[in-house]
Amino acid sequence: MTAPSIVWFRRDLRLSDQAALLVAAAAGPVIPVYILDDETPKHRAMGGASRWWLHHSLASLDAALREKGSRLILRRGKCDEQLAKIAEEYGAGQVHCLHHYEPWWRNAERAVAKSLDLVCHDGNYLAPPGSVTTGTGNLYKIYTPFWRALKERMPPPAPANRPSEIAAPPKWPASDRLPDWNLLPTKPDWATGFGNEWTPGEEGARTCVADFIDEARDYDRRRNLPSEEGSSRLSPHLHFGEVSPAYVWHRLSDAGGSVDVFLSEVGWRDYAQNVILQYPDYGGCNAREAFDAFPWRTGKAADTDLKAWQQGRTGYPIVDAGMRQLWATGWMHNRVRMIAASFLIKHLLIDWRLGEQWFWDTLVDADYGNNSVNWQWTAGTGIDSNMFPRIMAPLTQSEKFDAADYIREWVPELLDLHAHHVHDPDEHGVRPSGYPAKLIGHREARARALAAYDVMKAHDN
């Protein structure tokens, strides 16, 4: 009888367009496995919001496998050790998986390959990270030429259907019970609002794609308006691999209008992986070494300001609305993410890495590549980034992008304010007593940030 193959699931929790599963299923019996490995990533173990999503996504994947007569085996521990145990006990021949490019997953793949026949496939990105190169064969560091080169290779191959059948092994390995992993928060259950916002799993992802088709043509305008539902909200589904980017591309590319702007955002995911492939420690180290001397604020006052930012109590309504939306739903509107991140870095002069860590724990779409590249872009510390002296004005941004209804939704203290006043109640003398005053004025913050930048430049010289 043909030896069973193991399919090692990670951030690829789908049956359709899943190359590892398709190849394994064509070869014979399959043992689908997910391993909760908090040891290999060390300080990059999944945050709380991601664990909430993972619980529901794994439940969805198991249900889909059972419809095919299969099931998902759950194990906890180091991936190489757990896979080796299953392979030895059940006579598995090969381990199939999709390539992952976070540094800890690359380490895990090397460890697994030392003792098992590991076969890695592509499929989590539009093109395999590292395959889009310059004319001299080097990897791109700047997004615009990277995207130009990637577009020349588009469209990606048409997505494959799920296997028609998945043969079961003669005997199933023992499996952990998903509830025993305690991925869901309980004391307290801070995720009570998540279920109203999200439907994790492959079917939820496909529904999300279908719902966005009619909206995609107006994406370039509406994506910047927090008060409108202009975002695709596909980021967590893409992060957990519940839908492939190839599927998204083929379903949406003919939507017309400004859909190309949306597709460029899908391409940004590829760019971020291209960056961490070159700079594995991008989530914790400044790409521009000069910023190692930047005089970030530390101490009690900075800690107090950081906490106020985390809680959405900075006195800047657009920032506070975003931070409260994040806490309540595990997600934040993209335009507001930029505003909130810039505010922490340039208005509060707090190290971008503390913001990145907070997003890592609180975002359901927390992605190492995207998260670190976006934070370094905002901070001006990245290989391709905004210049630090370009300091975003949150109050101007709020009014420019018509965020009044968004603010009222997430900052109920300001619910009754006129649209013209809600962006800056302090300025108009209508700040309610229950809403905090600004931590710092915009002009004062800008002057302080530029002075700190000058200190860094002087040190660099």
Image: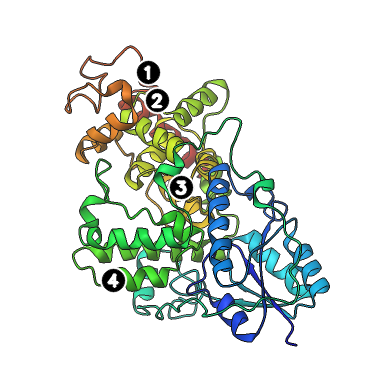
Can I make out residue 330 in this image? no
Q: Amino acid at mark 1?
A: Pro
Q: Are marks 1 and 3 in contact (CB under 8 Å)?
A: no
Q: Amino acid at mark 3?
A: Trp
Task: Tell me where residue 91 appears, x and y as whole percent.
Answer: 80, 78
> Which one is in front, 275 or 326?
326
The residue tagged 2 is 314
The first of marks 1 and 2 along the sequence is: 2
The first of marks 2 and 3 along the sequence is: 2
The first of marks 2 and 4 along the sequence is: 4
- The crowd level at tag 2 (other Cα within 10 Å; few <14, some 14-19, many 20+) is many
Question: What is the CA distance from the residue labelled 1 to the residue labelled 2?
Answer: 7 Å
The local secondary structure at tag 2 comes to loop
Q: Residue furthest top?
A: 433
Residue shown at 42% from the left, 51% from the top:
377
The first of marks 1 and 4 along the sequence is: 4
Question: What is the CA distance from the residue labelled 3 to the residue labelled 4?
Answer: 28 Å
Question: What is the CA distance from the residue labelled 1 to the residue labelled 3?
Answer: 26 Å
The local secondary structure at tag 3 comes to helix
Quadrant of the image containing the N terminus: bottom right
> Which one is in front, 168 or 190?
168
Residue shown at 47% from the left, 31% from the top:
310
Can I make out residue 190 in this image? yes
Question: What is the CA distance from the residue labelled 1 to the residue labelled 4?
Answer: 45 Å
- The crowd level at tag 3 (other Cα within 10 Å; few <14, some 14-19, many 20+) is many
The residue tagged 4 is 253
Q: Are marks 1 and 2 in contact (CB under 8 Å)?
A: yes
The residue tagged 3 is 375
